Amino acid sequence: MSSLELKDLYDGFRDPDVIKGYQKLIAAEAKKLDRNVNIMEVCGGHTHTIMKYGLTQLLPENINFIHGPGCPVCIMPKERVDHAYVLAMQPDVILLTLGDMIKVPGSHGSLQDARAKGADVRYVYSPMDALKIAEENSDKKIVFFAIGFETTTPMTAALLDVVIKRGINNIFFHINHVTVPEVMKELIDSRDEHVNSYDHRIDAFIGPSHVSVISGSKIYELFSIEYHIPVVVAGFEPVDVMEAIYMMMKQFNEGRSDLEIQYKRLVTPEGNLKAQALIEHYFEKVSLFKWRGMGNVPNSGLKLRDEFAAYDAEVLFENILPYDEIDDHKLCICGDILRGFAKPQECSVFGTACKPSSPLGSCMVSSEGACAAYYKYGNLI
Amino acid sequence: MCLSIPSKVVKIDPELNIATVDTMGVQRTAGLDLMEEGSVKIGDYVLLHIGFIMNKIDEEDALESLRVYQEILEKLDEEERRVLVLEDDNCVNREAP
Ligand code: SF4
Ligand code: SF4
């Protein structure tokens, strides 16, 4: 997009007076609190906002951010990228995907590399674009490499719904949808192994508003009720994040651990029920899904229900898909970063062997991963 | 990049279950598959994500953010504006304004 920078766009967009107002309120609350708090922003969108506006600088020293797993693109393990690669290399397959997925390296390379070798890999703006491509290429198998959190899952379901209703027989689905509450739970439960390294490692969560537009805020109830950890579902503008932190600080001082919505404009406790029904109809949980940098997380992935196996690319191409486990790069400490034990600068290859142009781990892969954000806005810390 | 610009519904095709929406002067279509039948009307403000309407936005909120986006977009030429609007609802991770 020519010489225009993201920063120029947002400049008129945030209100410095409001941000400063919240800064004061937060400082006052922080003073009353005689301990450090660690706030995890689960989503890469929030990490981006925090780093870009240098929000850490605006906050008192006793507030520390932990950067969560956050982006469906970054968390895609090499095994799944390899699936996409192998499928794309089939001469009768057209592989479709979204977002930055095309750039994520697998063990043979990325989908971009596959394309350079002649594979037909296409980037679509909407899953529905698959319909037209399937019609124009009736001799090909169209495989939709579906990615994303709760936010994009219903769109995949809607495409399948249309495919079934119209009797289209050349669109297949490779499902990589993952769910946010399960990985949050894993981040807390895994504390036991490291109990001495960090006390009260995650004291509160900033919940991604986009997920809750679909799923409602209710999916985070568990954390406030069972784990006694406050959750505030927040929007992505700096003002939204500052307000969410203020809401959390008040909770700490009042000894509450509530589930609150900062982003009332679009998020309700129930969410979009029609979208949830679509998801429920077509998908079921898988017992383990591997997250890049985090390893296997119980119940955190979805697959098509068995009755829709005829549309499942993993079933159709079972014989050619590789199923060997691949380890993350051994120098990469993404796992520790995501769990809140380490910061990107502590990684021995940060900014040297590992850069956005040659990422080794998930945190550097997408522009919104923690390492990428520190690399890009590092001068702000 | 995700500015999440509110869009206004200008046409509805019940047959294909598709709405035509206007996002800062850029028109495109979006699926109504995630919305209850009849819940979206012409003139409503909606939030788009990867080609689908995912929710309605309160008119007052929508107008307020549109005012802000307008200021931003005035700095862009037409091609930049089109690219920006199209990119806006494409992030797989976030979409709320
Ligand atoms: S800098 Fe690279 S190798 Fe190190 S933790 Fe981050 S992503 Fe992993
Ligand atoms: S990298 Fe950024 S733009 Fe891409 S999916 Fe993740 S959050 Fe969205």
Image: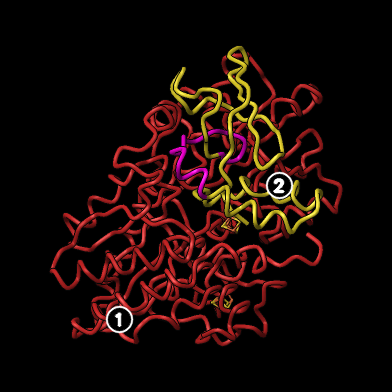
Chain colours: A red, B yellow
Provide the residue designation for mark 2. Answer: A86
Mark 2 element type: helix
Chain-order first, disc 1 or disc 2: 1
Q: Which picture quadrant has residue A366?
A: bottom right
- Ligand 1 is found in the corner quadrant, namely bottom right
Q: Please name the residue shown 53% across and 45% down the image.
A: A176
Give yes or no for contact between labels 1 and 2 (Cβ–Cβ under 8 Å). no
Tag of residue A27:
1
The picture places residue B97, in percent across and down from the top left corner, at 51, 50
Question: Is the residue A273 above or below the residue A100 in the image?
Answer: above
**Depth check, front residue: B45 or A42:** B45
Give the amino acid at mark 1.
Answer: Ala
Q: Is residue A281 magenta?
A: no
The picture places residue A194, in percent across and down from the top left corner, at 29, 77
Question: Is the residue A158 above or below the residue A86 in the image?
Answer: above
Give the amino acid at mark 2.
Answer: Val
User: Are the residues flagged by discs 1 and 2 from a single subunit?
Assistant: yes
The picture places residue B84, in percent across and down from the top left corner, at 70, 51
Density class for disc 2 (Cα within 10 Å; few <14, some 14-19, many ≥20) is: some
**Depth check, front residue: A210 or A262:** A262
Left or right, residue A85 beside residue A28: right
The picture places residue A294, in percent across and down from the top left corner, at 44, 64
Q: Nearer the viewer, mark 1 or mark 2?
A: 1
Q: Which residues are magenta?
A: B48-64
